[in-house]
Image (cartoon, rainbow, N blue to C red):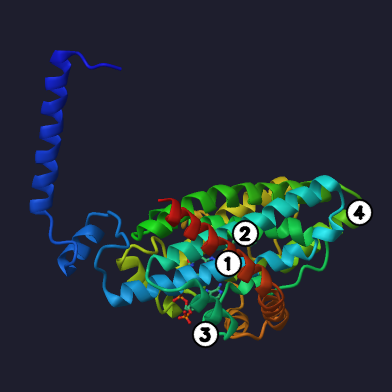
Amino acid sequence: MPVEPGAQSLLDQVAEAERDLVDAAARDRPDAESDAYFDAVIAADQKIEPRDAMPDAYRKTLIRQIAQHAHSEIIGMQPEGNWITRAPSLARKAILLAKVQDEAGHGLYLYAAAETLGVDRAELYEQLLSGRQKYSSIFNYPTVTWADVGAIGWLVDGAAIVNQVPLCRCSYGPYARAMIRVCKEESFHQRQGFQSLYVLARGTRKQRDMAQDAVNRWWYPSLAMFGPPDGDSTHSAQSMAWKIKRYSNDDLRQRFVDMTVQQAEVLGVNLPDPDLRWNEERGHYDFTQPDYEELMRVIKGDGPCNRERMANRRNAVESGAWVAEAASAYAAKHNNRQEAMA
Ligand code: FAQ
């Protein structure tokens, strides 16, 4: 659309004023290569981007956490993937397939976010397979009945959301942005789990027992997902100072309990904790802590399904190597053609 003559000069003036503002901001801002810039960005609650200088320890912490998170998403496909062939209806199968595919997608965004910190995805896979990097303890528990799929959606995705919504405000831009989409999808996952359990909890006696049994088995492992208690958490204080983590492990665990008690009432299932009760003074529910010694054993590789999960992962890498090679060859050919045309 043509611009009227008077309007053009106004637009030029606005553009010039904007340029002045940007120049002034650049003059006042410390050099993006400097430590002062990093400190100023963190203090102002802004985002650190891949091109910015950052302390080595900040970079290492992010690589550790984002890689562990990415590994959790892809290993996390296994417990529910176990039920895709046995879902009780076509609709449930389609929903479960979509959910498990979403987890793969989350892994991909997260590996991509980790790569912006200068590590190679292949290196991260290698560290997972060699046991040097971990994945969430929760995925080392078995899915023995169909109700476990509902309990994972409701409790595990529910816990994941409580932990991950604050990560949308993490100080590292690529991680924070990846978490926005992940959280939207996890929220849908949580609702489908709730809905699936809701149906079972209103079914036959056997279905109701199955739903309750699944909740009994997933409750404490879900509480343990939030990590060790604050007093034993090695990384929390520094990660909170850097605004990677926004809340401590115990604060998030409490938030999850407070939210879940009311949902259990709507579902009509019992949470397996005789000491769970509202504490008027604290304004929170009191609850029994999970077994943190068990959490440490599971993290170190000695949970009910650790060996099986890693064996499946290794097998997927080996038997799928030809697909990865073909995809890389195709991408290289496509790039070469694009470059030749350019
Ligand atoms: N499992 O000092 P802290 C999902 C380790 S995704 C294993 O408190 P930090 C979606 C910790 O790494 C679930 N290891 O550590 C889904 C550290 O070990 P290191 C994954 C654990 O990092 C749903 C040591 O203990 N979510 O569910 C665990 O400050 C359904 C000391 O702990 C994320 O990764 C654990 N539970 O806090 C998919 C979220 N807890 O490295 C499929 C991002 C602690 O010193 C189906 N991560 N450790 O040897 C985080 O928010 C944090 O990393 C925490 C741990 C909160 C997990």
Q: Going from the N terminus, do you reach mark 4 or mark 1 first?
A: 4
Q: Residue sitting at 44 percent across and 77 percent down?
A: 233
Q: Is residue 166 visible?
A: no
Say left or right for 79 vs 180.
right
Foreground: disc 3 or disc 4: 3
> What's the residue type where badge 1 is placed?
Ala
Q: Is residue 46 above or below residue 242?
A: above
Mark 2 or 4: in front is: 2
Instruction: Return the residue at label 2.
Output: 103
Q: Which of 75 and 191 is in front in this view?
A: 75
**In x, y percent, where is residue 15?**
15, 32
> Label 3 vs label 4: CA separation?
45 Å
The local secondary structure at tag 3 comes to loop
Q: Are marks 2 and 1 in contact (CB under 8 Å)?
A: no
Q: Which residue position holds label 3?
A: 132
Write down the residue under mark 1: 329
